[in-house]
Amino acid sequence: MNLIEQPICFAGNDLLLNNQRSIYWQAQNALILSDLHSGKSAHFRKHGMAIPSYLHYSDLERLQFLIQHYQPKKIIIVGDLVHAATNKEVIDFKRLTSTFSSTAFHLIKGNHDRISEKLIKDLGIASVTENLVIDTIQFVHEPNSNNNIPTISGHIHPGIQIPLLKNSRKNLPCFVVQSSQIILPAFSKFTGLDIKTTFKDANFYGFHEEGFFIV
């Protein structure tokens, strides 16, 4: 797996964006990500859609790779850990948290996290909250430009469209970085990309397997 990092300074903190859809915060030894949507492909298969299971397993393998690489003390999931109901794919996430039992997993609830808090904690989640504040940064699932403190959110699954040769274009997932807000890309690759929402005074850190494309 090719890991490319992009350092930024946000709210006085040095952060490392990476092209594997997460942020590493070295001062807190924390890995930050959002929108795993665990169980989504199984949920769609249950309803008659032929969605391959490798999408789910590739997300878990990527998360395992990141944990092994960074050795974080805590993982902050900024919403939408679970797509819908509990299923076999959701239970696979529990196996991952058991494997890395020395790492504390914290969930900020998202709009898809509708299963009970007890079931979420049974997956190996140490805490479930509506928001979380660490040092100078607040974590909340849905972006809000009116937040009074620097915030990291998810929910939107942001993307950018870049021009290629011969009048073609390509959509890339991205981090949206403003002076007081970061919007994370979806960690799951089985999501759409929002390339239409506009953001004032933002830098867009699009990425692919070989690096970053900054707008």
Image: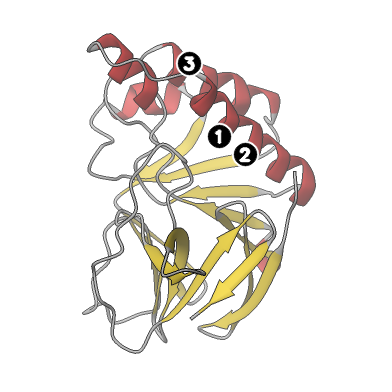
**Residue beneath disc 3:** 91
Q: Is residue 187 visible?
A: yes
Residue type at numbered disc 1: Asp
Q: Check residue 59 in the rendering and tell me which mark sits there, or answer none.
A: 1
Give the image location of residue 186, x and y in percent.
42, 50
Question: Which kind of residue does numbered mark 2 sit on?
Answer: Leu
Cβ atoms under marks 2 and 1 closer than 8 Å: yes
Asked if residue 184 can be seen in this view, the reply is no
Query: What residue is drawn where x is 42% and y is 29%?
Result: 38
**In the picture provided, is 97 more to the left or to the right than 185?**
right
Q: Quadrant of residue 84?
A: top left
Vertical placement of 37 versus 145: above or below? above
Seen at 28% across and 10% down, the residue is 46
Q: Position of residue 110 (x, y in %)?
A: 28, 45
* Residue occupying the far front of the picture: 166
User: Do tag 2 and tag 3 residues touch (Cβ < 8 Å)?
Assistant: no
Quadrant in the picture for residue 96:
top right
**Residue 55 x, y percent position in the rendering:** 50, 28
Q: Position of residue 94 (x, y in %)?
A: 53, 21
Could you tell me which residue is drawn at 35 percent across and 80 percent down? 149
Query: In this figure, which residue is indicated by the disc labeled 2?
Result: 63
Eye-nearest disc, 3 or 1: 1
Q: Specify which label sits upstream in the sequence, 3 or 1.
A: 1
Q: CA distance from mark 2 to mark 1?
A: 6 Å
